[in-house]
Amino acid sequence: MLDANFQYMIELINKRKNNAYRKVNEELILLYFEVGKFLYELIENGNYGDKIIVKAANFMKEHYPKVQGFTRRNMERMVQFYRTYKDDKIATPLVTQLSWTNNLLIFSSSKSKEERHFYLQLSIKENYSKRELHRQLQSSYYERYLLSNGEVTKGMSKKDHFPNARILDTYSLEFLDLPKDYSEKDLKTAIVRNLKEFILEIGKDFTFLGDEYRVQVGNHDYFIDLLFYNRELSCLVAFELKLGEFIPEYLGKMNLYLEALDRDIKKKNENPSVGVILCSSKEKDVVEYAFSKNISKTFISEYKLKLIDKSVLKKKLGEMKKILEDTLLFDK
């Protein structure tokens, strides 16, 4: 019993160490922002142009060689960092919550203020490592998120999620390394084997409960391919994996699974279960007709085994924006 009490001291130590790390990181980011501002104003107001950064780097190397991080390249990044966020009141309190490395990835890879805000908030929420953030940027998570309409928070007890708890329209499963002629069993096995990467793709609020998860209806046993619990949404989420195109028959089976989960597995304080039918393709009209009278929270998503070309996604976003603008114009 006494040892358990002593364990509390370790918890206090770790808590304060983490607080100290966050404070040091915050001060470092503010330092880089202030140095970036100082150099930016020298460049804008002086006669040296970008050469001032070379002079500053040489000064630091000669007089303060033990001070790390003040190379020419890094000071150029500090200027870019300040130039990017100097008038951005939303981003300013966010950047201090991320490491310098993750800040570099976001402001150097994002093309718009909205995209930067998205990745800043997502990285804070999900506590991304450098590798995880780089993967999300490479897989065009922002564009795929905007193209998805699978919002599942409506009618649920928890509000104000950011980024909104959302079932993506397209999931990128490039990390599975599947053989050419793979089966549904191969797909499920590969996902379970690469569960960490799969959860990164679907969201870190997902907790894995099992594969081939058994539910009983009457005298029959049914097996859900993958079952998760989503902590943010407080609900069970069933994934069914399909190799080909979505067909309406899949929906009836998912409805059965969700009803069984809600009646026999779901706890009283949890929200109704959600289903995701993950197919290699889907036809918009078939999905629309199949769901016209369906009331369950089921979503049809595609999966891709290769990273999607960002230009293709941007084109789709442009088309979606045009449709929305035309609709608004028509409504007037």
Image: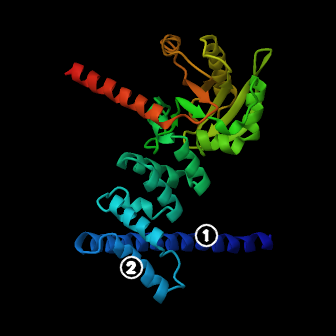
Q: Which residue occupies 62% across, 23% down?
A: 280
Image position of 89 with respect to 170: above or below: below
**Residue pictured at 41% horizontal, 46% vertical:** 115
Q: Secondary structure at mark 2?
A: helix
Which quadrant of the structure image shows residue 178? top right
Q: Quadrant of residue 60?
A: bottom left
Q: What is the crowding at mark 2: few (fewer than 14 residues within 10 Å), some, or many (at least 20)?
A: few
In the rendered image, is residue 238 in sight?
A: yes
Residue drawn at the location 45% of the way across and 55% of the way down = 108
Q: Disc 2 residue type? A: Lys
| Disc 2 versus disc 1: nearer the observer | 2
Q: Residue 240: give x, y in percent of width and height.
A: 67, 25
Nearer the observer, 135 or 20: 135
Whether residue 99 is visible, yes or no, is no
Give the left or right position of residue 241, taking residue 21 as reference: right
Q: Amino acid at mark 1?
A: Lys
- Does dot 1 land on a helix, a strand or a loop? helix
Q: Residue 242, position in %: x, y?
A: 67, 21
Asked if the residue at tag 1 contacts the one at tag 2, i.e. Cβ–Cβ closer than 8 Å, the answer is no
Q: Earlier in the sequence, mark 2 or mark 1?
A: 1
In the drawing, does residue 147 fall left or right of residue 11? left
Q: Can you say which quadrant of the picture contains the N terminus? A: bottom right
Quadrant in which the C terminus appears: top left
Q: What's the residue at 79%, 72% (across, down)?
A: 3
